[in-house]
Amino acid sequence: MQRERLLKVLVIGDLGVGKTSIIKRYVHQVFSQHYRATIGVDFALKVLNWDHKTVVRLQLWDIAGQERYGNMTRVYYREAVGALVVFDMTRLSTFQAILKWKGDLDSKVALSNGRPVPAVLLANKCDQRHHGLCPKLPKLENFSKEYGFVDWYETSAKDNTNIDAAITCLVKSIMSVE
Ligand code: GDP
Ligand code: MG
């Protein structure tokens, strides 16, 4: 008998960092310069044959326009078991917002044992690194450990760099929690 796990995963971070692009890349293998900022909450589903006895139904929740308010309602966070926290490597302000997003997450949802839900940090748009703020970034290795991220990745939704790796890392961490 195969068992099925439904995982609600949030994708959070400031407007324009590439959240929708990451979801579209991962789920539909496409990239576009123009995604409309739809209003409300939207999610995409990807089914993973995780191991010989487990099918994972991964729900990736996009915040679609509401990120401009800087935090989300508890309803959005309810029953989430993990998060991708995204910033744009070329914009320092989006990096500075990471702790606010992580704080919002941890204040509004936790695992049933009270521990924070696993979160992976994504430094997106790494294809643009030459325009970026790389030298100004603190060592992400230390930063991500210090603030309780499971791990961090430089990603590009445009070039399809590390998107799979980052999401697989998060799902592994979620699956190991039980
Ligand atoms: P969201 O507001 O966080 O959902 O961001 P979007 O996914 O709408 O992306 C905002 C803009 O950044 C769009 O023009 C995307 O095409 C662009 N973008 C997203 N990811 C990348 C990336 O990895 N590299 C580059 N160069 N552009 C990206
Ligand atoms: Mg979006």
Image: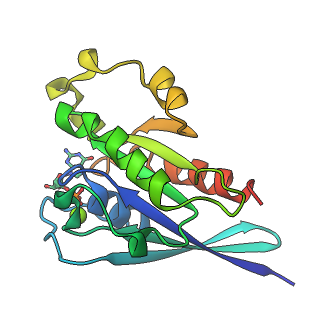
> Observer-nearest residue: 156 or 17?
17
Residue 22: x and y in percent read 34, 57
Q: Which of these two is toward me, 117 or 86?
A: 117
Q: Position of residue 133 (x, y in %)?
A: 21, 23
Q: Residue at x 12, y 64 (%)?
A: 34
Residue 28 visible somewhere in the drawing = no
| Position of residue 134 in the picture relative to residue 147 (left or right) | left
Residue 6, by quadrant, is: bottom right
The image shows residue 91 at horizontal and vertical percentages of 17, 35
The x, y position of residue 128, in whole percent, is 20, 34
Colour pattern: rainbow
Q: Tell me: 157 left or right of 166.
A: left
Is 113 situated left or right of 90 in this image? right
Does the image show residue 163?
Answer: yes
User: Image quarter for residue 98?
Assistant: top left
Quarter of image, ligand 2: bottom left
- The quadrant of the image that shows the C terminus is bottom right
In the rendered view, does 52 fall on the left or right side of 100? right
Q: Farthest residue in the top direction?
A: 135
The residue positioned 35% from the left and 56% from the top of the image is 12
* Numbered-mark total: 0
> Can you name the residue that lies furthest to the right here?
1
Residue, x 43% and y 25% (percent of image)?
A: 140
Query: In the picture, which quadrant includes the N terminus?
Result: bottom right
What residue occupies the far bottom of the structure in this picture? 1
For the point 17% across and 53% down, the residue is 16
Q: Is residue 46 above or below residue 115?
A: below
Q: Give whichever of 120, 127 is nearer the camera.
A: 120
